[in-house]
Every structure is written in structure tokens, then in C-alpha cells.
Amino acid sequence: MLIQQLVNGLTLGAVYTLIALSFSLVMGILGVLNLAIAELFMLGGYFGFAVLMAQLPLPLALIAGMAGAALVAAIVERIGYQPFRAAPVVTPMLSTLGFSIILQNVATNVWGSDPLQLTDEVLSGRFNIGPVSVSAIQLTVLGVTVLLVALLAFLVQRTSIGRALRAVAENRDVARLLGVPAGRITLIAFMLSGALAGAAGVLIGVHYAAITPYIGVEIGLKAIAVMVVGGTTRIWGALIAGPLMGVVEVMTVAYGGSQIRDFVVYGFMILILLLRPQGLLGGGRSDQGQRV
Amino acid sequence: MNSTAPARLKLDHVTKTFGGVHALTDLSLQVAPGQIVGVIGPNGAGKTTTFNVITGAYRATSGSVLLDGHDVTAEPSHRIARAGIMRTFQNIRLFSDMSVWEHLLVAQPHAGSFARRLLPTRFSNPKAIERAEEVLEFFALGDVRNRLARSLPYGLQRKVEMARAVTARPKLLLLDEPVAGMNHDEAETIRSLMLRLRQDGLSILLIEHDMAFVMNLCDHLYVLDFGVLIAQGRPEEIRLNPAVLDAYLGRAA
């Protein structure tokens, strides 16, 4: 029972990890909380569903969810962030909040406010490992997450684009003086972030076999708590915080009841803010706040 | 200086004001190809402001900045960098999570197509790797290539910053106090590196307080005081210029 819950928690945690990485990619580089990410996650799910309902395979649905969300992220960057770059950070945050509400509204109008159900099972089958039963979908969620995280790590650490991203994140002015086109790098960061959120949307949609326009608020926003717990200045904090929060949440539901679920998750976030504001992985206290 | 060839760098009547304060007033200066030119003056004279205007970090209030005859005054700083102007900083600004080697790669952001820049540099971009190796050897940084640049001793950090600036093969190198805080031997190393870079045709404009260093190295000097050019000429001329003596010694006395 306990191990079974652990597996369920890790599956949820995998999705949190992806969305939290999505948040912290933009946060780490620009110091801006892109609130529209929660809805990019939701839209990614719908894009993926559209592909699945056309009887196309899951990998295609993933690609569609990622590409679609990345495209919308690019629009958010050009309209909701770029014009406000010189403004205080709260201004782009408010504009992305506006985007977030609009996107949810668009989804409600296009797909309706009732949950959209997957009629055919995308992946069937379960694997029994001792007393633990893992569904093929759970394995897929975990596998795709690990793959995407590895790809992202690789991109950030080993490629030209990744180096430029890190340079802009640490010091935008110096990066530009080295010839790094910071504006374009910012756009790329938004799109990468969108692609991650979109993938998470497809995965959670497939996992629940259903999606609603409100999933962004329910699950997407929780990833902000995950990011805070991991440490907002350390992108990779989400790798620990995501699984942790997923497990905490599932255990809370299993042993405490679902009515206190959000209380525990967000309470944990506030506790971290109070006791260790730099997050679990953050370095010294000086690590919090300004990074760019 | 050959008068028919356009100057590598030309500042033409540049003025920069912040609010009502004149940081630079009507400054004109030139650097010829392969020349080492010094900008000297007391603190607050406008030397670093000059660098900031040249690199596009500040926009000149009036006047223009020309690189090889092309007006770059209104260009954004990443374009100016790409056009061939690179700089170092008075207070070293290296990236905290990058090795020496990575600093030489990040300084080549345009090497390769976009698709290649999404692949691991080592396999996708042999030219960038080759150039980084070349620079590493030139600056004798091979032993510390995999060390985090920020963990190195101060003198080496300065060298890494200079190496980073040179990697993209700029036409003009701006050095902001390249030997500040260095001992004599370290300063000598930097001096010989600068001379070798000049041999390769690089033009260098430097800010430096170490007078002996400047006098021994520069082909031409500009002296600023309160944002105004008060003297210019060859080092031996500047040494005896009464206005310069007054700006330095008069203030100190």
C-alpha cells in the first residue's frame, strides 16, 4: 500500500517537476513569474487530446502539445513580456496573469467547461512488480519526464544555446556585450518553458484520461509551490521538490483525506518561505532574490 | 597615422549627459588599426562612460561612434559586439557557473547555424572549438581550462576576461584597467600579450591608472578631466603637458 502510493506520488511528482522546471526556466533567466505557464500546461493537454482523438499515436500527441504550447508561449513573450521589459517585475507578471485568464477563457469557449474524456484507452496494461502495480501510463509519464529533463539538462549545459541562456540568466548586460542576442535568447527560454508545460499537460491528460479548462489552476499553479520549495534561483531544485511534493500530496490524500490536500501542499510552501526562503537546493541566503 | 584609411574607431563630438550632468562633453578621439591608445584621467573623468558609449551600453546624447567608418552609435550592444568591439571590465565580470573553457565558447554565440547551436558544441562546431583552443594556448590558460573561472586567482581571472573578449576576433579591444591590482610580473605578461595582439592587427583602447604601464605601451594618449578632453598626444608629450600635470598633481596637492 505504502509503496503503491509512492509510485502514484512519483507519477504526479513527475508532472509537477516538468511544470516547475517550466516556471523556473523563465524565472531563473528573467526573474519573472510567467503565470500563463499554468494555462500553457492546460492548452498542451488539449492540443495533445486533439491529436489522440484523431486516432494518432501518443508520441505525436506529445509533440503537438509541446509545439502548440511553445507557440503560445512565444506569443505571450512578444505581447505580454517583451514590451514591459524595462518595467518593474510586477508589470509583466500582471500581463501574464491577464494572458492566463484569457487563455482559460478561450479554452472554455472552444472545448467547453465540461471535462473532455478520452474514449479509447491510449495505453493499456499494468506491470506487477511484487505487491506494486504500475500502469503502462504511469511508466510512460515517468519515462517521458526523465527523458525531457535529461534533454533539457543537456541543452542547458552542453550546447551554444544553453550557454547563452546561462549567460543571459546571470548577467544580461555582459552577455549582450559578448554578442549574445539577449532578446532572442529570452524568446527561446519562453518557448522551451512552454514546451515543457505542454508536455506535462499531455501527460496528465493521458494519465487521467480527461481534461478540463481548469486543470491549469488546479495543478499548474501548484508547480509554483514546487518551484519555491526547490529554490527559485536553482533551476534543478525542481528535480527534488517535484517528486517530494507529489509524494507528500498523494500520501496526504491516502492517509489524511483529500480535503486537507491543498492545505498541506501550500502550507509546505509557506513553511519553506519562512524557514528556508532560498529553497531546499538554494545555497546561502544571499542566493535568494536578485540573480540577473 | 595614415590619413587616407578610415580610423578603426572614431568618436566624433560625443556628449553624454545624465539628467543635467555632463559625463562627457564633446569628446572626439580616434584609434587607428593596430594602434594601442590609452585614455587616462582622474577618477570620475568619464573614462568608463566613454567605454559604455562605445559599446552601446549607454547611448550618446549627441555625436557619433564609428567603427571602420560605419556609424554604430544607435546600435544595440550585442550588434556592436558582433560588429567587432569587445571589452573587459574594471571589476571582473565572469560567469559564476562556467569553466574557463566555457567562457571561450560563450563568447562565440554566433558560431554555427541555429540547429548546430542546439547540439553539443564539441561535435557540432569544430571551428568554435578550434578557436577556443587557439585562444587558450595564446593566453597560456591550458592548465586551468576546466576550473571554474571565478575560483581562479585574481590575475588569472583578468586574463580569462581578456581571453573571452578576444575569442570572437574583435577589431577593437577595450580594456578597463587591465593591470589594476597586479604585480609587476603579471603586468608584464599582460603587456606582452597586448603587444602580440597588436601584431595580429587588433586595435586596443585602454583605461589605466598605472602611468608607467601606459607610458611604455601606448602609441597615443587622451587625457580626460570632468568629461572634457584636456590633452592628447604621444606619451612623451603628455608627460610634460602642464594641463595634465595640473589635473593630476594639482588635485592631489
Image (spheres, coloured by chain):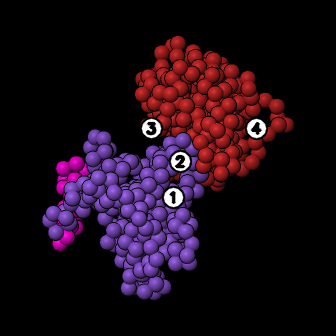
Chain colours: A purple, B red
Q: Which residue is mark 1?
A: A192
**Relative to A186, A140 lies left or right:** left
Mark 1 closeness class: few <14, some 14–19, many ≥20 residues within 10 Å:
many
Q: Which mark is residue A155?
A: 2
State how far apart marks 4 and 3 are (Cα): 38 Å
Q: Nearer the viewer, residue B27 or A156?
A: A156
Which numbered disc covers residue B7? 4
The verdict on a common chain for dots 3 and 1 is no
Q: Which residue is mark 3?
A: B97
Q: Check disc 1 and report its element: helix, strand or loop.
A: helix
Q: Chain of mark 2?
A: A
Q: Is residue A262 magenta?
A: yes
Q: Amino acid at mark 2?
A: Leu
Task: Give how far apart the Cα atoms at labels 2 and 3 are.
Answer: 15 Å
Between the C-alphas of marks 1 and 4, the distance is 43 Å
State the SS at label 2.
Answer: helix
Q: CA distance from mark 1 to mark 2?
A: 10 Å
Q: Amino acid at mark 4?
A: Ala
Task: State the extent of the magenta-drawn residues as a range.
Answer: A258-278
State which mark lies toward you, 1 or 4: 1
Whether marks 1 and 2 lie on the same chain: yes
Q: Local crowd at mark 4 within 10 Å, few (<14), some, or many (≥20)?
A: some
* Marks 1 and 2 close (CB-CB < 8 Å): yes
Mark found first going from the N terminus, 4 or 3: 4
The type of residue carrying mark 3 is Asp
Residue at 36% from the left image edge and 50% from the top image edge: A239
